[in-house]
Amino acid sequence: MHSLLLHIANEEPIMIDVEKMPEPTDTCIVGMNPRKRDGKEVHYILAEVTTVIFPWHRVTFVEVMPGEEEEEILSFVRE
């Protein structure tokens, strides 16, 4: 499962969960659990909705959020 932050044209960004990353040939993006970045409900999506479909022409850009396995940060220290 991947978490994406979608920047929708003329709206605030929303988070969605996707099972697989979108392909370049996709015409829309399908996601589950739509929410604001802080976890609150999105005002233009009904509270009982669990899956959303956005056409790509409405999406300005997508940020891929780090997953639990990606959160470990490696740093190099020069002494």
Image: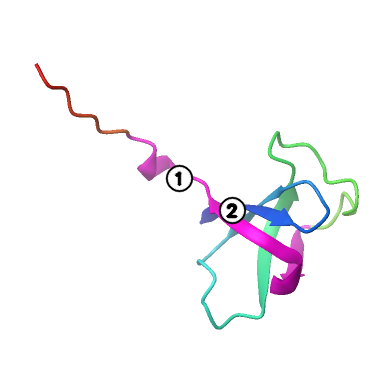
The residue drawn where x is 55% and y is 83% is 25
Quarter of the image with the C terminus in it? top left
> In this picture, is 26 found above or below 75?
below
Do the residues bearing badges 2 and 1 touch, measured as CB atoms within 8 Å?
Answer: no
Percent of width and height locating residue 30: 67, 68
Q: Amino acid at mark 2?
A: Leu
Percent of width and height locating residue 1: 51, 56
Residues in magenta? Answer: 50-72
Q: Nearer the viewer, residue 59 or 67?
A: 59
Give the crowd class for mark 1: few <14, some 14-19, many >=20 residues within 10 Å. few
Q: Earlier in the sequence, mark 2 or mark 1?
A: 2
Per the image, the residue denoted by label 2 is: 4
Q: Nearer the viewer, residue 19 or 75?
A: 75
Q: Amino acid at mark 1?
A: Gly
Q: Find out whether residue 39 is within the magenta segment.
A: no
Residue 26's quadrant in the figure?
A: bottom right
The residue drawn where x is 68% and y is 39% is 37
> In this picture, is 6 found above or below 20?
above
Per the image, the residue denoted by label 1 is: 67
Which secondary structure lies at badge 1? loop
The residue drawn where x is 46% and y is 44% is 66
